[in-house]
Image (cartoon, helix red, strand yellow):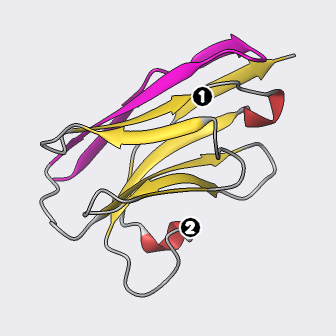
Amino acid sequence: QVQLVESGGGSVQAGGSLRLSCAASGYTDSRRCLGWFRQAPGKEREGVAVIDSDGRTSYADSGKGRFTISQEPDGSTLYLQMNSLQPEGTAMYYCAAGRIYGGSIWDHRQYSYWGQGDQVTVSS
């Protein structure tokens, strides 16, 4: 059984930092992508950062230069370091896992497994 459990969210003032963690278990696909997505109220779920099975990272424009995705060498935990957070970063953040079959890594429908989400609130 695949389990993804996020932690590390919370409230922070604009300009602050948070590090999200996602404990992953039960997923052994060596060709999987792992990603962080977020969803603000009334908005669609959007990709933030993705790391593929070769360790290559990709970032949405919203986080380039400020966010860093990484993982433990054994793949047990996924991280998202977020610096210089701004109020528009307020959202529920989710980690996701799946194999991308020719589609976009930013398409949340490509991911089969999801965590329960962790709230990040950035105040101005």
Which is more N-terminal, label 2 or label 1? 2
Residue at x 78%, y 53% (from the top left corner): 43
Asked if the residue at tag 2 contacts the one at tag 1, i.e. Cβ–Cβ closer than 8 Å, the answer is no
- Where's the C terminus, which quadrant? top right
Q: In the image, is residue 40 above or below residue 107?
A: above
**x then y, percent, for residue 83:** 62, 25
Q: Amino acid at mark 1?
A: Gln
Tell me the chief SS of the magenta region: strand
Tag of residue 119: 1
Q: Residues within 10 Å of mark 1 (few under 14, many from 20)?
A: some
* Camera-side residue of 9 and 105: 105
Q: Amino acid at mark 2?
A: Trp
**x then y, percent, for residue 72:** 22, 37
Q: Which residues are magenta?
A: 1-25
Q: In the image, is residue 23 above or below residue 120?
A: below
Residue 53 lies in the magenta-colored region: no
* Camera-side residue of 56 and 47: 56
**Element type where label 2 sits in the image:** loop
Residue at x 61%, y 46% (from the top left corner): 38
**Label 2 sits on residue:** 106
Q: Which of label 1 and label 2 is nearer to you? A: 2
Residue 116 visible in the picture: no
Q: Is residue 63 left or right of residue 104?
A: right
